[in-house]
Image: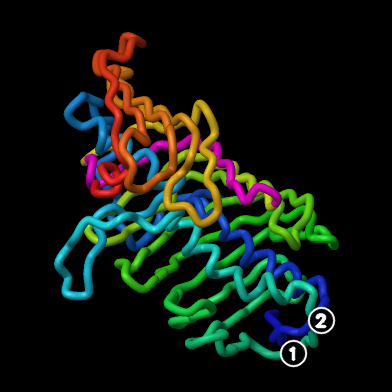
C-alpha cells in the first residue's frame, strides 16, 4: 500500500525518497533489464576509426561522460552549432535532486493516502508515490522548475532503495524517462535504467563517489540520439578543489556515427565545476578491427587552440599513425 507524505524534516522514509532523487546525479542505463522504451536505438555495428572520422568518433565518445547533444535546435527549429551544456545528462538528472537535497534534514508527517502532488519551487508540480517501507516508489514531474530557466518533465521509479541513517551510503535500482529543458538549448530526453552505489565522506558538501552500472540508457537532443550500453561509470566530487573526476567504460552507439565504438578512460577525466570542458584525462575509443582514436585532454579553454589531441590507429596494429591538435570548438560542433 502506498502512502502520502508531506515534505517536512527528518524521517527515514523521506531520506530514502530524497536519496532516490539524488541517485540521478549520474543517470546511466541498466539495473532493470531491457533497453530504453520510447527511443529508437542508433545502429550498433562497430565502425572503423579512420583519420576522416576521428573527430566525430572522439566527440561521440566524450558526450556521455562530459557533454550532451552536439547540434542544438533553436526555437525556430533551425539547427545551429553551439557548445554543448557541460555534463548535460548529469545536469538533467541533478535537477531532479536539487530541491530534495535541501530538505534532507526535514522532518516528515505521514498521512495514509495515495500519491501526493506539490508545487515546485518556481513553477510546475511533482507527484511522489512511495511504498510504506520507503524502499520503492515513483516520482512524476510536470514542467517542474526548481531553478530559473530549467524545467523537467517525466517520471522516475526506484526499487531496492537502501540509505544509511547518516546518508553516507546509498544504493538502489532506477528507471527514468525524463525530459530536461534549459533556456537556449534543445530539450534533452533521457530514457533507461541503472543501478547506483554511492559513498559519501561529507554528504552536505557533496563529497561523494557514485558508482553507476547498467545495460542501456538512451539520450536524445536536437537531431542526435546516442545510447550507452554495458557500462560502469564512477564519478567523484571533491568540494575543496571543486573538481569532478570521472572514470568510464561503455559502448556508445550514435546517429552521428551510424554505428558504435567501445569507450574507456585510460586516465580519469577531470572537470572543474562551472567549466564547459574537462581539463585533463585520456579516453580511448575502439572501433572495428581494433582501430582506435585516442583523445588526450590538454586544457579546458573553450576558445584556445590545441586543447585536445586526437591520435589515430586506423589499422589496429597498436601504433598511432597520426596525431592532430584541436580546439574544443571543433568537437562541440559535431
Q: Which residue is at the front of the view, 294 or 47?
A: 294
Residue 17 image-quadrant placement: bottom right
Please check the rendered image and state whether residue 251 is part of the magenta-colored stretch, yes or no: yes
Residue 10: x %, y % from top left:
83, 76
Which numbered tag is attached to residue 268?
Answer: none
Please say whether residue 153 is visible from this viewpoint. Answer: no
Residue 102 image-quadrant placement: bottom right
Secondary structure predominantly adopted by residues drawn in magenta: strand
Q: Which residue is at the front of the view, 43 or 55?
A: 55
Please say whether residue 251 is visible from this viewpoint. Answer: yes
To which residue does mark 1 refer?
A: 112
Real-space CA distance between mark 1 and mark 2, rounded to the nearest whole angstrom:
17 Å
Please check the rendered image and state whether residue 265 is part of the magenta-colored stretch, yes or no: no
To which residue does mark 2 refer?
A: 107
At x 54%, y 34%, the residue is 268
**Circle 1 crowding by C-alpha within 10 Å: few under 14, some 14–19, many from 20:** few
Q: Secondary structure at mark 2?
A: loop
At x 17%, y 70%, the residue is 77
User: Does 86 appear above or below 253?
Assistant: below
At x 41%, y 60%, the residue is 190
The magenta region covers 240-257
User: Does 76 appear above or below 57?
Assistant: below
Q: Left of 61 or right of it: where is 239?
A: right
User: Does 253 appear above or below 108?
Assistant: above
**Circle 2 crowding by C-alpha within 10 Å: few under 14, some 14–19, many from 20:** some
Dots 1 and 2: beta carbons under 8 Å? no
Q: How many marks?
A: 2
Amino acid at each position: 500500500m502506498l502512502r502520502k507524505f508531506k515534505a517536512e524534516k527528518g524521517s527515514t522514509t523521506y531520506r530514502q525518497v530524497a536519496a532516490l532523487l539524488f541517485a540521478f546525479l549520474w543517470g546511466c542505463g541498466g539495473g532493470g533489464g531491457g533497453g530504453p522504451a520510447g527511443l529508437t536505438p542508433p545502429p550498433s555495428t562497430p565502425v572503423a576509426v579512420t583519420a576522416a572520422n576521428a573527430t566525430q568518433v572522439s566527440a561521440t565518445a566524450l558526450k556521455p561522460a562530459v557533454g550532451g547533444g552536439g547540434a542544438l535546435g533553436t526555437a525556430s527549429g533551425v539547427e545551429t552549432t553551439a557548445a554543448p551544456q557541460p555534463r548535460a545528462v548529469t545536469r538533467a538528472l541533478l535537477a531532479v535532486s536539487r530541491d530534495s537535497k535541501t530538505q534532507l534534514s526535514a522532518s516528515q508527517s505521514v498521512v495514509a493516502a495515495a500519491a501526493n502532488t506539490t508545487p515546485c519551487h518556481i513553477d510546475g508540480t511533482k507527484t511522489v508515490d512511495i511504498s510504506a517501507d520507503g524502499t520503492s516508489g515513483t516520482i512524476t514531474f510536470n514542467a517542474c522548475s526548481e531553478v530559473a530557466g530549467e524545467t523537467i518533465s517525466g517520471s522516475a521509479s526506484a526499487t531496492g532503495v537502501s540509505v544509511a541513517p547518516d546518508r553516507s551510503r546509498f544504493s538502489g535500482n532506477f528507471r527514468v524517462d525524463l525530459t530536461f529543458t534549459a533556456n537556449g538549448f534543445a530539450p534533452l530526453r533521457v530514457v533507461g535504467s541503472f543501478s547506483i552505489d554511492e559513498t559519501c565522506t561529507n554528504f552536505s558538501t557533496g563529497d561523494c563517489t557514485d558508482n553507476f552500472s547498467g545495460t542501456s540508457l538512451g539520450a536524445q537532443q536536437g537531431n542526435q540520439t546516442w545510447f550507452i550500453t554495458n557500462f560502469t561509470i564512477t564519478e567523484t566530487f571533491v568540494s575543496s578543489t571543486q573538481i569532478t573526476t570521472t572514470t568510464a567504460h561503455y559502448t556508445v552507439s550514435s546517429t552521428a556515427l551510424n554505428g558504435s565504438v567501445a569507450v574507456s578512460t585510460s586516465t580519469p577525466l577531470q572537470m572543474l565545476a562551472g567549466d564547459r570542458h574537462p581539463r585533463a584525462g585520456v579516453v580511448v575509443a575502439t572501433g572495428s578491427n581494433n582501430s582506435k582514436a585516442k583523445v588526450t585532454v590538454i586544457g579546458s579553454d573553450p576558445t584556445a587552440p590545441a586543447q585536445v589531441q586526437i591520435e589515430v590507429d586506423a589499422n589496429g596494429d597498436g601504433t598511432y599513425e597520426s596525431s592532430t591538435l584541436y580546439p574544443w570548438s571543433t568537437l562541440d560542433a559535431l
